[in-house]
Amino acid sequence: MNYVSAENLTKSYGIKVLFENITFHINEGDKIAIVAKNGSGKSTLLKILMGKEIADSGTAIINKDIQVVLFDQEIDYDPKLSIEEFMMALDSEPILALKNYHKSLHSTDNDFIEKALADMEAHKAWDLENEMKQILSQLKITDLEAKMGTLSGGQIKRVALAKLLTETRAEHRHTLLIMDEPTNHLDVDMVEWLENYLNKAKITLLLVTHDRYFLDSVCDIIWEMEDRNLYVHNGSYATYLENKMIREENLNATIDKANNLYRKELEWMRRQPKARTTKSKSRIDAFYETEKVAKTDTRKDGLELDFEMKRLGNKILELKHIDKSFGAKVLLKDFSYQFQRGEKVGIIGKNGAGKSTLLNIIQGLEKADKGEIETGETISFGYFAQKGLTYKEDERVIDFIKEIAEFYPLANGRSLSASQFLRLFLFDDQTQYSPISKLSGGEKRRLHLMYILYQNPNFLIFDEPTNDLDLPTLTVLENFLQQFQGSLIIVSHDRYFMDRIVDHVLAFEGDGKIRNFVGNFSEYREARSREEALEKNTTVKPEPAKEVAVVTETAPASASKKRKLTFKEQKELETIEKEMPELEDQRSKILDQLNNEADYEKIAKLSSELETVSEKLENHEMRWLELQEIL
């Protein structure tokens, strides 16, 4: 069944053309992700599909038998309503049937009771309330009597998401679900639950997200919006990147050919042909077409900085026996850690576990209940916080940056002006002289990121940096952070981002316990899964007591001891402990090669090597755990 058909859509704002003559179709069951940098027109396209914007030309036909539902960044709600009242404020027949059924429980009108029961049956609403509560529970919303006005921004987003999923479930009509950054403000467990929910649900989905693991798990079609066009890629995020690279290589080859032809034709044009025959006019027209292709600019705006970092001394940062509680809730208990030069640490854990509190304690913004913090004299923190920028309402972008410095120093002795630095962060001249208050949410996040880096820190602290950043900006940020020579702490629920950047994990595991794990995010999750499985498998249920003869002698002490490793097992353990660091080092080198390799044949070969090494390392780790259990 066809849901949406769009033909030759064009949309402009003033002289800026967002997209031009784009054509696409959405069919039942499609799960589509939109990838584009901020300002490419993806939000405008969503508004056109919602009927909130009108295209300049072209047609977008929405099937009259479907309902279009949007999960937006801006949530509209009445702060006086309870969560339950907000959830039940849905205009659908199953929800209305459920409301009337609740009213009938307190009614003596038999006709009303009978109608309420009949409506519940007719609209299949019996399981709806239970499913609604299950969705809320999975999203960690348990107090349904709480007023919407008392919730945090993240809680409001989660309640709105629960309402949207309930609405999709309640409507038995065909539904096109449009979701704009649904994973913001969700911890990893919630994101993985939402992945499973959307995978199992028989829905048609159009998704905007920066979470590449989520995108890969949920969607099998990617729409790329770039240079006014829309490109359709069937397959994974990796397939999209490969297709994009091939397209750009073909474009560059076409431009090279056009340049060669342009030089020859330019020489002919300069001779100013007098004979205006049909043939010469045709050649002149062809010249201008060739000139247009030859002058195509394939350079992409990006954040390419040769960072001149402030010098790091021998002492970086050391935390000694830190305690922190809020009432009965223990966030940190006897936590100690010494940060090393160039270390990239990821901090993970559930919402409310204390991650942001630890960042505040490190920077002296909040006091620990107990313990010491020693910070090196040369340390200069750069803090990218969730709360965003603080700025004057009428302050211009360029003036905001110039308050720090007129110029940004580069490692080679040169410097960039504030305006040049802004252009690297995709702020054109017109935007630079606009008030900050006029920027979009994504542009403000990008300006905030630039503001932090422009201060030239040597110790970066990022608290959920990926929210509201587009994928092109994220990719360049990742490349920059991989080359950053200073120390780095990242709090993020973006698994792909964490896997690319961090080499060490501090995991909040509850009750003030923070686990120190060497490796990236996925490696930590795999290790936890293996440990949980091992604990489950090694838990021995007590056998029923057997009748035994009474003896007067004491049982040998050796009977209660665990057995020792055999000679063969001991040698095996020694071999494993020797080989594991070598495998980890080998794996790290392959990853470094992959990150810097552009040749797809070499990438395929390296990927195969990585899989072999990772599998061997995983087997070693499992066997090591088994042998340690015996010990």
Image: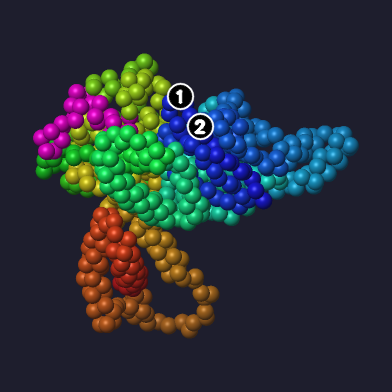
Q: State the residue at coordinates (43%, 46%).
A: 211
Please give the range of residues in magenta: 404-427
Please name whichever residue, 100 or 435, is drawn nearer the observer in this view of the structure: 435
Splitting the image into 4 quarters, where does residue 226 fall?
top left
Would residue 358 be visible to someone looking at this image? no
Q: Residue furthest right?
A: 111
Would residue 21 be visible to someone looking at this image? yes
The kind of residue on which mark 2 rests is Lys
Please name whichever residue, 258 or 200, is drawn nearer the observer in this view of the structure: 258
The kind of residue on which mark 1 rests is Gly
- The residue to which callout 2 is attached is 11
Residues at discs 2 and 1 in contact (Cβ within 8 Å) = no
The image's colouring method is rainbow
- The residue to which callout 1 is attached is 14
Splitting the image into 4 quarters, where does residue 178 fall?
top right
* Residue 416 inside the magenta-drawn segment: yes
Alpha carbon separation for disc pair 2 and 1: 10 Å
Q: State the residue at coordinates (23%, 26%).
A: 418
SS of the residue under disc 1:
loop
List x then y, in percent, for residue 572: 26, 77
SS of the residue under disc 2:
strand
Task: Name above or below for residue 11 compared with residue 434.
Answer: below
- Number of other residues with Cα within 10 Å of mark 1, as a class: few under 14, some 14 to 19, many 20 or more: few
Q: Residue furthest top?
A: 394
Q: State the residue at coordinates (47%, 43%).
A: 230
Residue 599 relative to residue 53: left or right: left
List x then y, in percent, for residue 345: 28, 47
